[in-house]
Image (cartoon, helix red, strand yellow):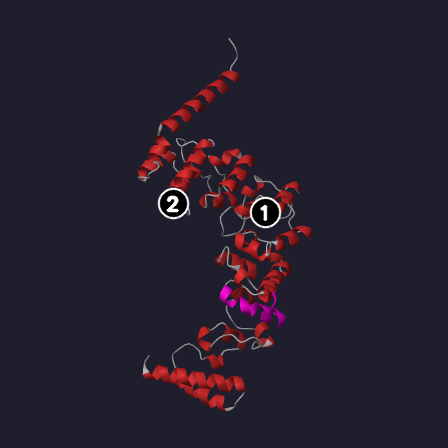
Amino acid sequence: MKPLHRLAAAVALAAGSLLLGGCTTSLVVAHLYDKITEGDPASCFRLNSVDRAFQPRCGPYRPGSLKAEDVRSSGLPVCPLSLAARDPAYWKLLPELIEKGGSPEACTTAPWVALAQSNPCPDFAAADPREREALRWLAEADSRAIHHDVVRVLSCPNARIAGLDTVLDHWLAQDQLRADTLPFGVLGALHPGHLRSPLARTLEARGHTARASLGAYHGQLASGFEEALRTADFDALDWWVQRVPTLVDRVPAAQARQLPWAPLARVITPAFVADAARQRELVDYLLAHGAQPWRALPHDPQLTPATLAAKLHSPLAETLAGPRVAASRSGATAAATAATAAILPVR
């Protein structure tokens, strides 16, 4: 550290102690510090209590240090509640922000949406009870938290361990998860590991369907079937395929200007599967359930999953073009011939 910077650090430490102690000498020290650090980021003395709490360079956050007027008007470019919610390092600020008037409705981005889109399954168990209660309050008090990406996070394994998945049960009990009013398919929003839960069964009993959950939604996290495929969650894949068998070969477009996509093509694409060692299992699963490796891809009629695998030099190219595929193609041809014969007049 350069001598000038060492001096600035020493002055900052001394001034910080004076400021917290309410000493008027802190004004003189603050002026000296500003001169030494001219051109650097704004000094901690000039930041309000909320801004200072988010600045590690200003020292650790001290509970009780936030001022209510700063919470209501922080001057930060991002709402303090959203800023604190999206980063587990700042969850410790949430209880005091809420107690001193922080309102999620004042945030442009709902705090829980900010959290979900920055970390799809944080370690909620690492939060202390007050922090978890603050997170729960934010989810239950803010109607904008009922969002595709938030449902994914609240149903993920870490949320279930910490008991935060019960927020979903609360929404259900409050009739906030109606199939005819939600702007997204809640079954497709659930984490793949939560599809066999009592909640999912109740949702189906109340009219939610897997097919409807393949539609459009506003969010950044992948659709439920795609996430199950990406993570090689075969139990979840079974759940989807039992309800919509055609998914193994074609997934319908979620948006009006999108194209359907072929799971076989996605699976052999590098980096799509979270654990590349499970690519072969997924290809075998899809083929066994009727995926067609020689069917043209929606985005390029000149390509099929089999030819794409060869083009990518995939180790699965032979699997897609091998005897098993030939046999399935023969079976498909025979089935097509039988179907054609069934509708032709008998001569």
The numbered dot on residue 119 is none
Residue in view at x 38 percent, y 37 percent: 300
Predominant SS along the magenta part: helix
- At label 2, counting other C-alpha atoms closer than 10 Å, the crowd grade (few under 14, some 14-19, many 20 or more) is some
The numbered dot on residue 276 is 2
- Left or right, 218 with reference to 3: right
- Residue 91 falls inside the magenta stretch: yes
Q: Position of residue 161 (x, y in %)?
A: 56, 55
Secondary element at tag 2: helix
Q: Position of residue 114 (x, y in %)?
A: 52, 60
Q: Amino acid at mark 2?
A: Ala
- Residue 161 falls inside the magenta stretch: no
Report the span colored magenta.
88-104
- At label 1, counting other C-alpha atoms closer than 10 Å, the crowd grade (few under 14, some 14-19, many 20 or more) is many
Residue in view at x 51 percent, y 85 percent: 19
Up the image or down, 201 lies above or below 142; here it is: above
| Residue 32 quadrant | bottom left
Q: Position of residue 10 (x, y in %)?
A: 40, 84
Residue contact at pointers 2 and 1, CB within 8 angstroms:
no
Up the image or down, 2 lies above or below 287; here it is: below
Name the quadrant of the N terminus: bottom left
Distance in Å between CA atoms under marks 2 and 1: 29 Å
The first of marks 2 and 1 along the sequence is 1
Secondary element at tag 1: helix
Q: Position of residue 186 (x, y in %)?
A: 59, 47
Residue in view at x 40 percent, y 82 percent: 9
Q: Which residue is mark 1?
A: 186
Up the image or down, 149 lies above or below 226; here it is: below
Q: Residue furthest right?
A: 174
Q: Amino acid at mark 1?
A: Val
